[in-house]
Image (cartoon, rainbow, N blue to C red):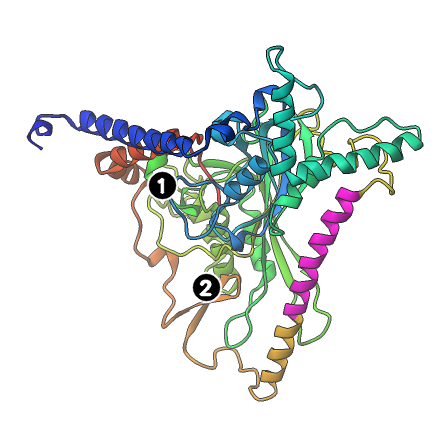
Amino acid sequence: MAEFESWSREQLIEHIAALEVKKNKGKQVAHTNDVSPDKQERMFKFNSYAQRKIALKFCYHGWDYNGLAFQVTPTPLPTVEGVLFDALCRARLIDRDAGFEGCDWSRCGRTDRGVSSAGQVIALKVRCSLRPKVSKEASLNEEEDVQKEEEKEGQEQGQKEKEKEQEQGKREGQGQEPPIEILYTQVLNRILPPTIRIIAWAPVREDFSARFHCRYRHYKYFFESLSPPARPLDIPRMQEAAARLVGEHDFRHFCKLDGSKQIERYERRVTSATISEVVPSRSGSEKPLYVFDLIGSAFLWHQVRHIVAILFLVGQGFEEVDIIDALLNANASHPNPDPSVPFLERRPLYDMVEGLPLVLWECGFDEKDVKWRTDDYDGEEAVVPSLMPSTIQLRESMESALAASRIKTSLLEHFFQTAAEHHPTPAVGTDKVVRVHAGGGRIRHFNKYEPLLKRKRGPTVTEVNETWKNGRGPMVAARRAAKISAAGRMEEEEGPE
């Protein structure tokens, strides 16, 4: 230990990072040595095949995953990217040893644990069958070995070839050109769990980035009003408050501050913020379902969930609509010109809503950058009904999940109706408990409600950034960077939800 006493902080951090890289490389070498020589010789050789860059559009059930982004440290639940990466490797569309960096992986937007997506997008380079790329030095025996290994360990690929031959016969009988590309949607959906479904794919340019070429992101948050004795939601008040979010504002009081990102600019542009009824009430005892739609170019960490939390407070009458203006008045260099609006340098402490009802609904791209297609549709010609195995399989799997969910919902409704026969509905304010809407069927209970402007305030952006820089932040960042480098994973970007 004596030899390290004279080292500077920067030297210690650099030494730790080097040890982490060396440790992980040793694990990789040990793993490689476990593979038999015969297995190594007959491994699938990706350099014998052509590649193309594509975008994948997919949906997933957020409640089954520990978020979208792959994590270098163990997580309680699998991540969506981790499951999707494994499926791509099993289908031999990407090389596992090359990692995420090796296939130029990019994502449109992060979602945290419990948050779902109906139209998430990633871009990456995958194996394709358009232009076979076998090296001149490759022997015939090597080609046979590759084919045998592919047939042995890739049943999905073998099944795909069989179906392609059947499809070719049908198309040739109708005077159409035989298909020449891998059925990406069908191959991946056969491997992926039902909670992740590939919806479409698109060929993209080599320099395309799912993150930086995205023009807008559309989030939806679904909710119901609360039943007595809680205060119900005043939807018109919430709609009035949501309208004040439109435009470019400083949203530092509508997000979670993260010193590791060292963010200093919190201005974001919201192009639309509306609340509408999704499922009208079909009877007097049935509550309607509402949705908050938020569209913008980019979002801060937990921004949507913080916004909805404030809208619920306004809707229940705990806060006035003007609280939106006060929370947006956070930048001293661009204060609100109305002197009656208080300036808030620090954010009042409040909790965001649950993530279950939040959905990344759509990622928008220019048509010149992305033109979606399926295995049965090239984006231009009409779909031939007799040539839709991929579409039929996708719809069947999703309809099965939907049917199971509807049955569970129906059962819970009957259970509640049975209980209601013995337990009548109380009146609003029957007891003295304050019930605050937390989203996703959750309610927070308080003895007394304290208005936001009278609550304790959190640290400023500068204080959060300085605390991280002067504390254990650099050492933690060095360790994380070493793990990311060893795992072949790109550095994390600023993520919204």
- Residue 400's place in the image compared with 128, above or below, is below
Residue 200 in view, yes or no: no
Q: Which mark is residue 318?
A: 2
10 Å neighbourhood of mark 2: few (<14), some, or many (≥20)?
some
Q: Using the rendered view, name the quadrant where residue 296 is placed.
A: top right
Which stretch did the figure color magenta? 389-409
Residue 440 within the magenta-colored segment of the rendering: no
Q: Which mark is residue 258?
A: 1
Q: Nearer the viewer, residue 267 or 178?
A: 178
Image point (35%, 52%), residue name: 348
Image quarter where the N terminus lies is: top left
Query: Alpha carbon of mark 1 to alpha carbon of mark 2: how far?
Result: 28 Å
Q: Amino acid at mark 2?
A: Phe
Q: Position of residue 491 (x, y in %)?
A: 42, 31
Residue farthest toward the top in the current orientation of the protein: 136
Q: Nearer the viewer, residue 470 or 239?
A: 470
Q: Position of residue 467 (x, y in %)?
A: 25, 39
* Image-based side of 40 in relation to 119, left or right: left
Q: Which mark is residue 395?
A: none
Question: Do the residues bearing badges 1 and 2 touch, measured as CB atoms within 8 Å?
Answer: no
10 Å neighbourhood of mark 1: few (<14), some, or many (≥20)?
some
Residue farthest toward the right in the current orientation of the protein: 174
